Image (cartoon, rainbow, N blue to C red):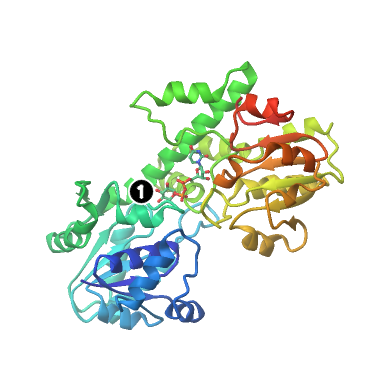
Amino acid sequence: MKIAVIGTGYVGLVTGTCLAETGNEVLCIDINEEKVKQMQSGVVPIYEPHLENLFERNIEANRLRFSTSLKEGLDYGDIIFLALPTPEDEDGSADLKYILGVADDIGKLITSYKVIVDKSTVPVGTSDRVKEAIAKNAKVEFDVVSNPEFLREGFAVDDFLKPERIVVGSSSEKATQLMEKLYKPFVRSGNPIIIMDEKSAELTKYAANAFLATKITFMNEIANFCEKVGADVDKVRIGMGTDSRIGKRFLFPGIGYGGSCFPKDVKALHKSGKDHNYNFEILDAVVNVNQEQKLKLIPKIKDYFNNNLKGKKIAVWGLAFKPETDDIREAPALYTIDNLLQLGAHITAFDPEAMPNVKRRYDDKIAFSKSMYEALEGADALIICTEWSIFRTPDFSKIKSLLNHPVIFDGRNLYDVNDVKNEGFTYLSIGR
Ligand code: UDX
């Protein structure tokens, strides 16, 4: 099939590349000329495991191409994916200017039947607005379909190629059939393509992300309470999670969720509720608890240093909002660092992928290390903010010899409490 993907951000790029991988011919469109040139020369503009391989392979096979011309994309594709940003507006709602702007152009430019697929995360009712915007000028037939993505950063390629489910919101038989044909190769395992109306599909995405954010936040509150009563959240987590109605995943407490999706989507669903006279009380609580959770290590650190962090050198392991990504959006590490800087501490940080992004934000306000151990040289404490695998089995005696004080503040509960204590450390984590 011939596909155009409008917008080559994270979602667009993964979508375009993975659709090419199953033999479709894909033309990706972006207004950023420099980025398009970069991609044409075979360079992937983001860090995402396994993407580079697929990207190069499909460019070589001439199934994956790039252009800055929206017109070219619309002439080329039978199915047009919209993978455009929906940034958070000042009031928490999703800003639809990019999507509606392109929809307007689509109406003016299409000359034959097209299925327009909305992959971006958009508030309920957006497909109607996209339809209206296209219909204003369109002289030919078209359909608009909602097809939310459920890609996790770091696992996006795998999630796209082997999805647990595909959700398609469509009220046109013709468009539904095309979507089923397109996605069939991805669900050979028997996982479902779930067809529903557009509004339900749009809401499914928000409901899924808001639920997961709530699940994490609930567990964070249980962890906070464990600290008050002397219970161990690891035990509680396993005790709860083995109930199959609850499930083991997304029950890991820590210094809060971050990233480009959960924070934005929880707020957008709350705002969407308000717009329809519905108050999502639970989501209010989730936002507030998560905000506080990001700073959960700070009182522990202050306590240890008797409220005096002036001039203390703190080593930070992990800056990305989660492992296997260089994404630092809403990263708990940055909230923690900002707070420590305000308290007069000096920071030396290490992250396997995210340091260039953090450098751009902090200039020379914090120092960076080439290795996880170099960050510890002469530091007064170690703080762990992201659970990268390389931090999981460190050489504790080396850590101890490099630190001025044998103390670890762990925002991701990486180690067994007794093991670290037996190594001679003061070890403070979350909910244990
Ligand atoms: C998420 C959704 O999983 C994906 O389906 C959606 O389409 C986009 O948003 P992503 O933002 O890549 O994906 O991250 P995810 O792996 O889901 O983690 C989100 C945040 O939750 C991270 O900050 C992570 O550290 C945190 N988290 C996750 C916890 O604190 N505890 C957990 O048990 C799980």
Q: Position of residue 37 (x, y in %)?
A: 47, 82
Depth check: 292 or 307 in front? 307
Compared to 394, does 84 lie above or below? below
Queried on whether the Cβ of the residue with tag 1 lies below 8 angstroms from ligand 1, the answer reads yes
Give the SS element for disc 1. helix
Q: Position of residue 109 (x, y in %)?
A: 29, 81
Tell me which corner region of the image, top left, top right, bottom left or bottom right, holds residue 241. top left
Depth check: 112 or 363 in front? 363
What residue would you read off at disc 1? 205
Q: Position of residue 368 (x, y in %)?
A: 72, 57
What amino acid is found at the position of numbered circle 1 in the picture? Lys
| Horizontal arrangement in the rendering, residue 100 relative to residue 313 (left or right) | left
**Residue depicted at x 47% and y 51%:** 261
Residue 104 visible in this rendered orientation of the protein: no
Depth check: 11 or 422 in front? 422
| Number of residues whose C-alpha sits closer than 10 Å to that of mark 1, classed few (under 14), some (14–19) or many (20 or more) | many
| Horizontal arrangement in the rendering, residue 216 relative to residue 74 (left or right) | right
**Residue depicted at x 20% and y 61%:** 179
Q: Quadrant of the C terminus?
A: top right
**Residue depicted at x 60% and y 55%:** 352
Residue 111 visible in this rendered orientation of the protein: yes
| Horizontal arrangement in the rendering, residue 307 relative to residue 219 (left or right) | right
- Number of marks drawn: 1
Tell me which corner region of the image, top left, top right, bottom left or bottom right, holds residue 145. bottom left
